[in-house]
Image: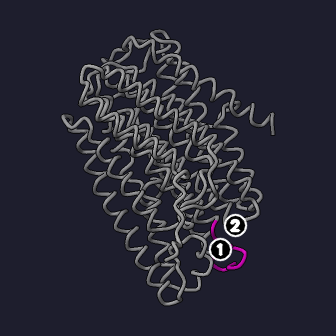
Amino acid sequence: MENITSFEWSAVSAEAVLLCGAVLAVLFEALFPKRRAAVCAFAVAAMIAAMALDLFAPVPDLSFGGMLGGRGGFGVFITACALLSALLGFGYFSKGGARRCEFLAVLMICAAALSVFARSRNLTLSFVALECATVCLYVMAAWSRSRASSLEGAAKYLVTSGVSGGLFLLGIAFVYGAGLESGVDFLNFENFTLGFCSGKFVAGMLLVASAALFKLAAFPFQFWSPDVYQGSPTPVSAFFAVGSKAAGIVFLSQMCLAVDFSAIPEAASRAVMAVSAIAALTIAVGNLGAITQTNAKRLMGFSGIANAGYLLVLLASLIKYPKSAELFEISLYFYLAAYMFANYGIFFVINQFEGEDDSALEFSDFRGLIRKNPVADSALIISLASLAGIPPTAGFFGKLLILILAWYAQLYVLMGVMIAGSAVSIFYYFSWMRASVDAGEGGERRLRDSAAMLPTMIALSAATLVFGVFFFFRV
C-alpha cells in the first residue's frame, strides 16, 4: 500500500535537538548530581545547536503531508527566548531557586512545542503542540511552589488555559463538522478560504481565534496576565512576556496568510472590524491599567497587554491589505525582536535584586539604582524607552513599521488609538525611570553582586539601540 504521508524528519531537526537535549539533561543530572554546572552548560549548548539548525539547515516549505510548514524566523526567535530565560535562570537559581536542570529541560520542551505550534498548518497538530507547551508553562509558573504568589499565578493560568484549550477543541469540532458537510478537509490551513461559505466553519474559527487570543493576552482574555507575571519566577515571567505572546500572534498570522481575503471581501471586512475593535480595546486596557501600577512585574503584565494590541494592529492591516504580506512578516519579526530585547533587558535588571521572590518588587526599590549599579540602570532606561517607542531605540522603529502598514491599509482610526496608547505609556514607563535615577535611598530590597549578568544586559541594551538604526539603514 502506498504511503500517502511523507515524514521529512529533517524538518523537525531543531525541535528534536531541544527535546533530546531536555531528556539527556534530566538523565545526566540524575546520574551525576554533583555535576550540575556541566549539565546546565550542556543544556545551553543544545539550545545553541538548535538555533544553528534553525538558521542553516534546509527545510521544505511543507512536510509531514502538508501539516507542518517551513521554519521562517520563529524557530530562531523562540530558541533565543529560551536561551535568554536560561541565562536569567542562572541568576534566579543562584538566589535560592531549586531544580535548575529540570527547569532548563522543561524550558526546552516548551520552546520545541511552541515552535511546532507556530509552524503547524493543521488545526489538530496546532492543538496538540499548544497543549504540550501549556503544560510546560503551567509547571514553570508554579516552580516556586513554596510561595503563595507563585501558586496563585499558576492556578489562574491553569484555569484560563483549560478554558482556552476547551475553546480550541470545540472550534476544531465545528470546523471538522463543516468539512464533513462540504466534503473538504477544513482542518488544513490551505482550505480555509473555501470554509467561509459555512456558518459552522466561521463559528469554529472564532473559537480557535479566541483560544489564540488567550495566549496573546488580548482583550477580553487578558485578565490572567498581570497575576501570572507577578507570581511566576522572573525567568518564567520573561518567557511568558515574549515567547508565549509571540507564538500566539505568529499562529494567528499564519492562519490569516492562508486565507485569500480578496476572494471573500465581505468576510474580510468583518474580520478587519473585529480585529480592529479587539486591538483598540486591548491597547486601551493595557495602557490604562498600567497607569496605576507601582509593582514592577505587574506593570510588565499590563505592558504586555498593550503590546499585544499593537501586534493586532499589524494583523488587522494584513487582513485589510493582503498585498502587504511580505512587509507584514518583516514588520512582525522586527517588532518581536525589538520587544524581546527590551523585555529581557528589564527582567535582567529585576533579577539583580536579592531574594528569589521578585513578586513584591516596587518602583521604590529601584530608587538610587543609578548610583548603586549604573550598568543595570542604563539597561533599564534604554529598555523602557524602547517599550515607550522613544527614538532611536528599536521599539520606536518597530512601532513605526506598524503605523506604516496601517497607513497602507487605511486604518486611520486604529493608528490614532495606537499613537494615543503609546503617548499614555510614556507616563508609566517614565515613572519607573524617574524612580531609578532618584538619588535617594531605595526600598528594603538590596542589589546582589552579579557581574556575570552585566555583559548580557549590555548586549541587550546595545541591540535595542543599534538594531533599529542598522535595519533601516540597510533597507
* Residue 386 can be seen in this image: yes
Q: Residue at x 44, y 41 (%)?
A: 18
**Secondary element type, mark 2:** helix
Give the residues in magenta.
258-268
Labels 1 and 2: the sequence-earlier one: 1
Q: Residues within 10 Å of mark 1 (few under 14, many from 20)?
A: many
State yes or no: residue 181 in magenta: no
The dot on residue 268 is 1
Residue 325: x percent and y percent? Answer: 71, 59
Residue 197: x percent and y percent? Answer: 59, 85
Q: Is residue 196 left or right of residue 90?
A: right
The dot on residue 320 is 2
Pointers 1 and 2 in contact (C-beta within 8 Å): yes
Q: Quadrant of residue 24?
A: top left
Q: Residue at x 46, y 76 (%)?
A: 204
Q: Is residue 71 left or right of residue 79?
A: right
